[in-house]
């Protein structure tokens, strides 16, 4: 009996032969011809995985008038691009996009396919994984691969109310699929001299065969893309209430940025969750991050420490935020922030 169950479990551990599945594929998400930054970030990370596995990095571009994105994908690290460019693919709709993606994935047989963990990426990845069928790890923050022969994708994501990091494997199906958070990975520098191949793919469904119509696209007025912002002015518990966020908004407006927040400020109800930076909020990678009245707890730092330049304003010179800051301003935020806003306005006028 014991022998039999041992045999059974060793059979389960046996990996099927996946030798015809090779390559790492990244879905390049775009709207109105503009790629989401997360797509370039995933190409940067995908390049590392592809190099480790010694395979091609493949990009999948779907849309209308998006051939420029195929060129950009090569410049950001892709070796080959599959490009589906047609009027019926102008706006994202699950069925036509998933039909194209499924066709390419079934033909090309990549071993790994990655999407941004955006509304579109989550929807498309879920639809594709169900049809293939294969496993899908959502919202990853760390990606790695085991080398040959297992070639397993190690897809890690926070789990159990973000208290643990779980590494999830997809042993028995191919391709291995994951969505990954924006702002976590770094795009490779744009290299216009890189060479790659572009293969055109047809759209597979005519407009008449698609049941859904996009009548109008209305951008939610309270929705801004914190993870795409180049300048973030973030406030924490040091603000003492919701009112001082107006001071931060003024500074953000003067700089052309947006307002972020620590969880303490969000939990206190001073500002909405869409503004939260950190482990249970957004991971951001702006050019400039100004942390105001934020102590620098590790859960906040993981969400912003990869910013290009960090300025911290805090009246406690020992605040941990200063350890990751490029510029430290020690003092009272209520004096410093209005003075900064005035200086920026004067500079710009
Ligand atoms: P505090 O730590 O209270 O810091 C306030 C700072 O303001 C202090 O350093 C103080 O010196 C300064 N200050 C006060 N008055 C002034 C003034 N007048 N002028 C200048 N400086 C002043 N936190 C996040 O931010 N994001 C997350 O996603 C997140 N996820 C979490 C997930 C888990 C599972 C857990 C357990 C915690 C998480 N936290 C997260 C909470 C985190 O641990 C901290 O509690 C939180 O970041 C603290 O926010 P804060 O820095 O605004 O507040």
Image (spheres, grey):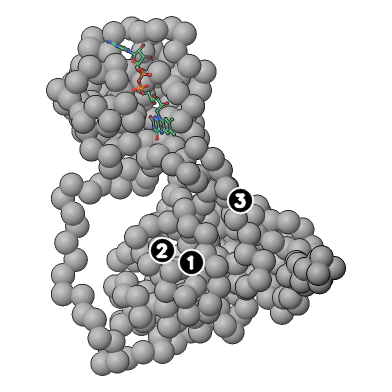
Given residues 80 and 171, the one toward you in this image is: 171
- The relative height of residue 165 versus residue 314 in the rendered view (above or below) is below
Give yes or no for contact between labels 2 and 1 (Cβ–Cβ under 8 Å). yes
What is the crowding at mark 3: few (fewer than 14 residues within 10 Å), some, or many (at least 20)?
some
Position of 204 compared to 20: left or right?
left
Residue positioned 71% across, 79% down in the render = 20
Which element is circle 2 on? helix
Mark 2, residue position: 121
Looking at the image, which is closer to me, 292 or 5?
5
Q: Which residue is mark 3?
A: 167
Q: Is residue 217 above or below residue 90?
A: above
The dot on residue 158 is none
Looking at marks 3 and 2 on the same chain, the residue that comes earlier in the sequence is marked by 2
* Residue 46 in the image, given as x and y percentages of width and height: 60, 58
**First in sequence: mark 2 vs mark 1:** 1
Direction from residue 44 to residue 48 in the image, left or right: right
- Locate the C terminus and report the quarter of the image it occupies: top left
Judged by depth in the image, the label closer to the viewer, 3 or 2, is: 3
Residue under label 1 = 27
Q: Residue at x 73, y 56 (%)?
A: 146
Quarter residue 109 falls in:
bottom right
Label 1, secondary structure: give it.
strand
* C-alpha distance separating marks 2 and 1: 8 Å
Q: Residue 221 at what x, y percent from top left?
A: 16, 50
Asked where in the image residue 81 lies, by quadrant, the reply is bottom right
């Amino acid at each position: 009996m014991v022998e039999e169950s041992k045999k059974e479990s060793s059979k389960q551990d046996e990996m099927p032969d996946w030798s015809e599945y090779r390559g790492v594929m990244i879905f390049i998400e775009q709207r109105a011809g503009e790629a989401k930054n997360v797509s370039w970030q995933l190409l940067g990370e995908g390049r590392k995985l592809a190099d480790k596995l010694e395979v091609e990095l493949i990009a999948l571009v779907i849309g209308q008038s998006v051939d420029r994105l195929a060129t950009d994908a090569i410049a950001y690290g892709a070796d080959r691009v599959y490009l589906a460019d047609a009027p019926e693919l102008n706006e994202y709709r699950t069925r036509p996009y998933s039909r194209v993606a499924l066709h390419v994935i079934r033909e090309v047989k990549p071993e790994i396919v990655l999407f941004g963990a955006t509304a579109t990426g989550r929807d498309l990845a879920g639809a594709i994984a169900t049809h293939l069928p294969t496993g899908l790890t959502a919202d990853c923050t760390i990606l790695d691969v085991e080398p040959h022969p297992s070639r397993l994708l190690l897809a890690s994501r926070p789990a159990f109310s973000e208290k643990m990091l779980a590494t999830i494997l997809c042993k028995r199906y191919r391709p291995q699929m994951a969505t990954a958070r924006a702002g976590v990975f770094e795009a490779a520098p744009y290299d216009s001299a890189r060479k790659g191949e572009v293969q055109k793919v047809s759209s597979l469904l005519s407009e008449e065969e698609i049941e859904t119509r996009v009548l109008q696209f209305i951008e939610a007025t309270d929705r801004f893309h914190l993870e795409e912002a180049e300048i973030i002015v973030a406030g924490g518990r040091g603000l003492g209430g919701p009112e001082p966020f107006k001071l931060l908004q003024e500074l953000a407006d003067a700089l052309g940025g947006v307002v972020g927040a620590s969880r303490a400020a969000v939990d206190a109800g001073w500002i909405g969750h869409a503004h939260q930076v950190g482990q249970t909020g957004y991971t951001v990678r702006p050019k400039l991050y100004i942390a105001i009245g934020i102590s620098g707890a590790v859960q906040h730092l993981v969400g912003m420490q990869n910013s290009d330049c960090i300025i911290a304003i805090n009246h406690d010179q020992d605040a941990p935020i200063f350890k990751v800051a490029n510029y430290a301003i020690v003092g009272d935020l209520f004096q410093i922030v209005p003075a900064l806003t005035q200086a920026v306005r004067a500079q710009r006028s």
